[in-house]
Structures are given as C-alpha cells and as structure tokens.
Image: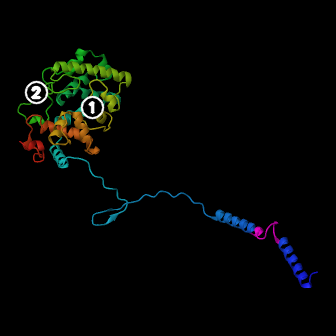
Amino acid sequence: MCSPQESGMKAVGVRMVTRSRSRGPVAGPRGVGEDAVRLRMGEAAAEGRKSCSPVKHPQKTQRLKVAYEAPGGEKGEGTEPLVAPGWEPPDWRKQLENIRAMRSGRDAPVDQLGAEHCYDPSAPPKQVRRYQVLLSLMLSSQTKDQVTAGAMQRLRAHGLTVDSILQMDDSTLGTLIYPVGFWRPPALPFLAQAAHPPAYSFVYSQRPRRAQALPSGAPAGHRVQSKVKYIKQTSAILQQRYGGDIPASVPELVALPGVGPKMAHLAMAVAWGTVSGIAVDTHVHRIAGRLKWTKKATKSPEKTRTALEEWLPRELWSEINGLLVGFGQQTCLPVRPRCQACLNRALCPAAQGL
C-alpha cells in the first residue's frame, strides 16, 4: 500500500509525463522534437536571408591610369607613356629644311618635265590618263626627264592609248621613243643662264649602270628595243586583264614587264593619288647615302627605300622623291657635286672630306 503522499507524487508525475507527451510533435526521447523545430526554423531563416541578399555581379576590370610628370612638376592625367624613339639621322630635320630652301624655286627638270607633267590631263577617260602616266614612267628608266618628255609628246601626237600602241608596229614605236639627233627642251630657267645649252641623248649616262631587265652598259639602240618590247607586253596585259586601265596596287604593277618598284610607287601617287611608299631612284639613293640617311650603307635603291621608310615620318614620303631628285639634278650631282653652293655643306658627312 502506498501512502497518500507517494500516491500524490505518482499522480503528479503521470500528469507531467502526459503533458510533455501531448506537447511533443513526434514521439521519442525528450528534446528530439524541439531540436527538429529549431533546425527547420534555422533553415527557413537562412533561405530568407539568401532571397533578400543582393545579386553579386562580376566586377569589371579597371584600367590603371598612370600620370606622368609634366614640365614644371605637375602631373597630367591620362598622359600616354613615353616611347623611346628608334634610330634616325642626327641632323636630318635641318638637312631637309635646307634642301627645301634650295629647292624653293622648283625650277629643276623634274619640276616641269616629270611624270606628272607628261600625260594629257584632258584625255578621256581616266584610264587613258593613267596609262599615259605609267608609260611615261616606263620610258623614264635610265633616261633624263627632258628626253622622256620629248618622246611622250611624239607618242601623244599619234594618239597614246592602249589600243593605238598595240596596233603600232615595233619600228614606228621605236622611232617615236628614240629621238632623231638631239632633242632640246624649250627655254627653261635652268637652261637660260647657260651660254651653250647642253644637248641631251636618249642614254641617261655613258657610264655603265644597273638597269632593270637590261644588261649593264647596254647601247641606246638595245635599250630602245627592250623598251618597245616591254611597252607592247605591258599594254597587252592591261588590255586583257584590266580593261585598258592600270593596276591599283604595287604588287600588280611590279608584275608588269619593265615596271620596277620606283615606277610602281610613282604610278600609285600620280595616277591613283595614293602614297604607297617612297619612290627611290638613283638620285634619292645617292643623296640618302651621302647624307647618311640610312642606318647602314645600302647597295640598291630598293634597300634604300626600305631603310628610309623605317624612320622617315609617313607624311613626308610623298615629298621626298621630287625634292631629292631636283636637288640631285641641280646641286648634289653624281659627279663633281656643287658642295660649295650647298646649304648642307657643314652637315653633310660626304662633304667633310672635300
């Protein structure tokens, strides 16, 4: 038998157990239900925080701007980094300025009888004018400007087109491009001062020279025959492949018979109005060597062109040919240059030993 107190405690215990069982969500040991509730509440809170957190986007790469010190100690923002200049002749700007001053009169043969003056500007259509430019350049190889201009005048009098050249027999074409006797240009400033104007022959110089596709020191008759052949071959190609026009790129031009790099770059400039490179002939090649405008000595005009284009600003490329050719015709002659009258005498390495 139990005492009343023991029976009361048992009753209370039963009620407490019953109450705890009725509150628990699931049956099991004490505390398991509460832990599960807390776990679910924690997961719900985490989901809420994740849904409310802002979306993170990948950051853009930012460029680092470097400020370089400007004169006076101030720093300029966005200043371009200084690039170390490549090789260039030490006095070339002053030398070029002096050559411009000596050529200010523009009275050399090239200024009045060059390729840009030999074609008929009124000849329609445009491809005829371009063809005449190319033909004058082909005739100018190893030939003085005065002789080329005379030959072009005679060809134009017979109608200078691709068709007319192809229809002309070789002997007639050779006669037209080879001056009978000596041809003298009209009165020009550079000849008016001479008591005995010089007589010009077809051959540029009696000294052996390297010529494209021609043997060195070939006689004038052989050169005329070669030029007749090249003119006929090139004219046929232009008619068949280009509709009587001339190519508009240097690679296509130099692929034509009798057309070299100098002619191609001049044709691009005069006929197409495009500066594709520096046109280097014997004058430009000689003067660039005397002024040491190449990093090392060059043995051909084409190597000189490559060396000049490595450092000479591109905006000067179109000016160099006409400027130096006239300078070479009047002052910086191939033989016995007129160094005494040259403004670059003190700056020219070649003149120092004279």
| Residue pictured at 19% horizontal, 42% vertical | 293
Q: Kindly identify which residue carries mark 2.
A: 199
The quadrant of the picture occupied by the C terminus is top left
Number of residues whose C-alpha sits closer than 10 Å to that of mark 1, classed few (under 14), some (14–19) or many (20 or more): many
| Residue 24 highlighted magenta (yes or no) | yes
Residues at marks 2 and 1, CA–CA distance in whole angstroms? 29 Å
Amino acid bearing label 2: Ala
Instruction: Check disc 1 and report the residue beneath it.
Output: 261
**Three-letter residue code for mark 1:** Pro
Quadrant housing the N terminus? bottom right
Q: Is residue 141 left or right of residue 251?
A: left
> Residue 88, percent across and down?
22, 47
Q: Residue at x 73, y 65 (%)?
A: 40
Earlier-in-chain disc, 2 versus 1: 2
Residue 264 in which image quadrant: top left
Q: Quadrant of residue 291?
A: top left
User: Helix, strand or loop at disc 2?
Assistant: loop
Judge left or right: residue 210 versus residue 83. Answer: left
- What secondary structure is the magenta-colored segment mainly? loop
Q: How many marks?
A: 2
Tell me where residue 37 appears, x and y as whole percent: 75, 67
On the question of residue 124 being in view, the answer is no
Q: Viewer-proximal residue, 21 or 203?
A: 21
**Segment tinted magenta in the rendering:** 23-34
- Spot occupied by residue 96 in the image (x, y as percentages of width and height): 19, 46
Query: Crowding at label 2, few (<14), some or many (≥20) Cα neighbours within 10 Å?
Result: few
> In the displayed image of the protein, which residue is found farthest to the right?
1
Q: Is residue 201 visible?
A: yes
Q: Where 112 falls versus 232 (above or below)?
A: below
Query: Would you identify the image quadrant in which residue 36 lies?
Result: bottom right
- Where residue 349 appears, as percent x and y from the top left, is 12, 44
